[in-house]
Amino acid sequence: MNNDTRFDALIAAARPEKSHPRAEFTDRVMQSIASPEILSSQIRRMNDTKKETFIMKLRHLPKFAIVAIAVGALLLLSTGVYATYQLLWPKPEVTVSAPTTSQNGREEVAISFAQCGDTAMAQRFELKRNAIITSDQIAGLVKAQCELKAIGAWSEKEFGSEIRNRMLPHGTEPYDNEYARPSMASLLTSRSATSLTFGGLEKYHQSEKTLPTTENVRYFADGMQVKASDIAENSPVVYIVKYREHMTPKPGCDNTHCSISSTLLGEELLAVVKLSLPFENYDQLAWQSLTEKMVCTGNEADACLTGYIGGIDLFMGSDAKLNVDGFVYKEIQGVITKIEGPTVTIRSSSGALFTLAPGKDIVNEFNTTRTQHYNNRKIEVGNSVGVRYYEPKDKHEKTLTSRNIAYISLQLEMVSKGDPLNAY
Amino acid sequence: MNMMNKETRIIEQIKNGDPEAYRELVERYQTGLIIHCENILKDRQDGEDIAQEAFVKAYVNLKKFSQDKAQFSTWLYRIATNLCIDHLRKHKRSVKIADIELLAQVVDPASLPEDEIAQIRDLVETLEPPKYADIIKAYFWEGKSYQEIASTYDTSTNTIGTWISRAKQQLKEKLA
């Protein structure tokens, strides 16, 4: 445990009451609480082209060093000449197994991959019930995601962070702000001597965008810089733009309380990156048709669904404590097989039965008092729930109580945010 | 009125239909919670987004919160930590969940000793040079980012990091 982190918390906790934190943050929270019910973060964020797109995914990636790959070194060595080519981003390699049927009755594939940035990807994927793709398309989608991650990491290193400085750096004075941001995967729909037009995002309700070109615009393909003419019309691309905006504090600002409005002053095309796969592989909705499966923490024989699945909070416990009596964090997911008052039994992917006894009738509570917020959907046998709980590392209790359970959520299956609320 | 009683009263007010009372809890815990999320996610903006979501989620579920069993901050930090884990998972970031959970417990304001907190509050005013005190206040108490503070001082975020680190070292020495 990092003592510095605890010390940070001590300093933050020492804030005198008279000292005011940022009012804009408080205001955002207060505005948000007007909505009577919220879904889990997964749903609230998914398929929102502003908040949950490839662009935003890239923002979360850590920086990593440019990967150098020696291409064909052996071949060249054999001729007495050798050279090392440095790719600006690595080319992903993905292998997909033949599809099988998962415990949830969905088509499932196992994936092995390399050169997918430094991020952890799931090893198994299954198709959602309302998937808009078939299993033979999964390899391309995964490869495309790997490529986007790699390009995003390179872009951040090359052009700077896309994080927009929306804080107030100069007291109450207006100021100009600049940041670079890669686009979603798009199509280079047309070009002229002085501009490029990007499109292909109609399904996300985004119209075509035309940006002027200068001699400073750089072009890339397959991890290397290329000529503009090497990227043909209708190629799938990511383009990187530098945005400049004017930030104006709203009336009534002082040094501690301020809201800011922004006005776009200009955009400058910095680079165009040709993508290596057909455009449909970069489709966000296609990607959201997949459910990723990872090993459940603390229950290694079981698979836990992750990625683009939604959830409705059913229980957030406060009795369970980590590190008390040697308790560690664990998680399990399963299909409800029995509901008996406040006790719910689930069957995990390995076939193990877990009895959940959180001390509250979470099913009845949801079905009677919250259901109207969720299109009158009811919790029933056959639905899936996810559970986070604590217990000693070497124990594997099959009955979990309020002493163990930290969180229970009903798992939902959606591809688009607007889809009906289907239990997984 | 001590802090705990005041918090109990605020929560009762909210449960009785006064949402505006929540503002005080948001002000009280926001900087610590943002820093906690930032530490987990290694990204300031993500930290703010998740902290905001945690406050909203805590508010929505406040009716289910029992003050007899836990303090509000413990519950709030648990919600935020859950959201951070979801976020890391969703963005395929390698994550040691047990470490994160442990971190959440150690930094929960309810777990921190009051006397040490009070001492730090006084000691911040004694930092030298005085700008160290201003920077500590800006980051830890006013919720400003490194970038924002750097702009105010017309310097780099790395320099701000160095100054904060030195200021913390001074505080630790004074506390010892």
Image: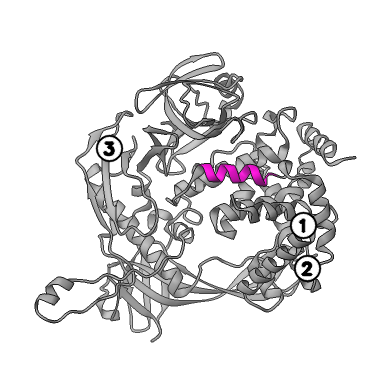
B78 left or right of A54?
right
- The mark closer to the camera, 1 or 3, is 1
Q: Are marks 1 and 3 in contact (CB under 8 Å)?
A: no
Q: Are marks 3 and 2 in contact (CB under 8 Å)?
A: no
- Tell which subunit mark 2 falls on: B
Residue extending farthest to the front is B176
Asked which quadrant contains residue A318, the reply is top right
**B15 up-or-down from B164: above or below:** above
Q: Residue at x 54, y 45 (%)?
A: B99
The residues bearing labels 1 and 3 have C-alpha atoms spaced at a distance of 58 Å
Q: Which residue is mark 2?
A: B134
A283 left or right of A181?
left
Asked which quadrant contains residue A373, the reply is top right
User: Mark 2 vs mark 1: which is more N-terminal?
Assistant: 2
Predominant SS of the magenta segment: helix
SS at mark 2? Answer: helix
Q: How is the image coloured?
A: one colour
The answer to whether residue A360 shows anywhere in this view is yes
The residues bearing labels 3 and 2 have C-alpha atoms spaced at a distance of 56 Å
Q: Residue A272, how many percent across, how many down?
A: 36, 73
The amino acid marked with disc number 2 is Asp
